Image (cartoon, grey):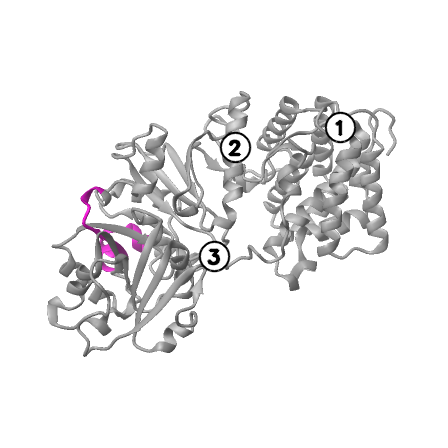
Amino acid sequence: MAMLKNTLSTEFIPGINVKGDVAGANWSFLLPDLELDRVLCIGVPAPTTFKTLTRLSREVIILCRLPRQVQELCKPGEKVDSTQVYPIVMNARLKRMPLPSGIIDLVLVGKEWGAWWTGGEQGLPAEIERVLKSDGSIYFEFGNPFEPFSAGRDKLNGSLGGSFSRQVFWLTPLHGEMQTAVPWQDKKTIDYLVRYYLISSTSAFKLLARAERYIVKHPWSGRLLRRSGVLLTRSASDISGNPPRYLRSAAEAAGIDLDQSRWALLARGKFSSRKVLFLLFEKDSESPQHIVKLTRDPAFNNRLENEYEALTLLWEKGIGDQERLPQAIFCSHPGNLMLVGQTIIQGKPFRRQHKSSPDHPLGRDACAWLTKLGESTVDPTIASPALVAKGLRQLFARFLEVYRLTPEQSIFMEGQIDSIEQALGEFPLVFQHGDPGTWNMLVTKSGKVAFLDWEAAEPHGMPLWDLFYFLRSYCIWATRGGGRRDSLQVFAQSFLGEAPLNLFVSEMTHSYCQRLGLPNDLIQPLYYTCWMHRALKETTRLPQAKLDQGHYVNLLRTSIDQSNAPGLRWLFVNQDTGKL
């Protein structure tokens, strides 16, 4: 395997994963299957929902009152992501859909259902039953206090209930895109989500969010202002409280039976790269035993595939334990999406620890394990210094296609890569986590730091890059405990200035080099190329117009312009010679 195989094969395209540009229709992950032939929307879906439906199915049929409602989504008959879209205009005088019987896999009943509620109790329900396949599904929501049509869908629920098996879901937030779902009768799992703040709120304001959590938590208010999702099928086994069929099938192939498992769906986050999660509980367990990750978009499959391969390789090498990193136990590709089941690590988020200080034991434990990871996987036979420099020059060329540096800054960076090329002896590559920020860590009951989210792992990665990245996020976390908020300013204080954190950063870095036999004169070029790499990765989350505002490119510029800062001189000093 080549050095930085995943990094060097990645296209860093600005704006392809910006905040807020996230797929909709999170309820679709509740369906028995993620591969559909035809979907019927009763009412015009939201654009984000429409986008997901065109990925799920071959045809999307939309019943609307006005053609322009669909034209705003796409042109009539136009293919969207290879999906054919057909609008059907209906009104209250038409009591029959112009569709053959038994052709629809999924009926999504939206807000505008009332336009086709004709013929009394036999109107819409009878037509849905006629066009639906024998193994088809129906999904709709009711009980949402912010929607005037919600009470009517409650009536629809009663009308269809006699012909179908029904599964009702407890949903949050109260309004907007659904982000958490639990089978309605599973109070124990609902209590778990509430207890660990895993439910979602409509409002970003803390007081309003707290009020919403109170509403959904308490029985009396939850009944009055509930939000429910309903899945109807003719197959009782698909809605008997078990996880979705596609998930159970993936686990069954690995010898794991989920038929009696309790479960919860979490589809939170504002980035398309953010994974959908399933928490799986044994029947009477208070805590989940497994977690399942699922991509929202096939464009991000490679990241989860890489995590599965990385965790499998680490466990095969005997690196880590049940408290340090999860174990991948099954995978599949339902609906062309990557799904990975893992063991779950019980612990509290690293960033919720209340005692933040420059020299907290958690920081030392994380640094010690990253050092041990490097020491256990170091391999000097993969690439020579010249080959490493060649790969870094490729990254630097891509960097310059995206970002602007002054001529002096460019010459400085070229000099750093030259220093690696001119290094004596062999160059040690290591297994690299790739994203060891404090947000990807848990603290277990025994006080160990566990490392999650190995999507960016590199089996033959660069030494020190993981450590520098962790130390940056750790220093910001520790310093923000004192009330400072500007992350670039905090970084400059921690790495460039004279502060207690400088000693900690220097101590952990030189300890790493000593354990791996890494020459101290490589610290400086590895430091600068680390931030060059992080700036490249950040491009996908930045719109073209905001590239110059990126955190890591400005961190790199600042570090170059202040290369003689006291903190850096301390960090780069060769402890054997006392020279830079």
Q: Position of residue 497 (x, y in %)?
A: 77, 44
Badge 2: few (under 14), some or many (20 or more) residues near its Cα, within 10 Å? some
Q: Position of residue 7 (x, y in %)?
A: 64, 42
Amino acid under disc 3? Val
- The residue mark sitting in front, 3 or 2, is 2
* Residue annotated with mark 2: 309
Return the disc, 2 or 1, that comes first in the chain's sequence.
2
Q: Is residue 568 above or below residue 113?
A: above
Q: CA distance from mark 2 to mark 1?
A: 24 Å
Q: CA distance from mark 3 to mark 2?
A: 26 Å
Return the disc, 3 or 2, that comes first in the chain's sequence.
3
Name the mark on residue 22: 3
Q: Residue at x 43, y 70 (%)?
A: 74
* Residue annotated with mark 1: 427
Amino acid under disc 2? Glu
Which span is picked out in magenta? 214-237
Q: Residue at x 61, y 26 (%)?
A: 373
Q: Position of residue 279 (x, y in %)?
A: 36, 39
Return the disc, 3 or 1, that comes first in the chain's sequence.
3
Instruction: Classify mark 2: helix, strand or loop.
Output: helix
Instruction: Classify mark 3: helix, strand or loop.
Output: loop
Amino acid under disc 1? Phe
- Residue 532 vs residue 315: left or right? right
Q: Position of residue 248 (x, y in %)?
A: 31, 37
* Front residue (pair 493, 22): 22
Instruction: Classify mark 1: helix, strand or loop.
Output: loop
Res 392 visible:
yes
Q: CA distance from mark 3 to mark 1?
A: 41 Å
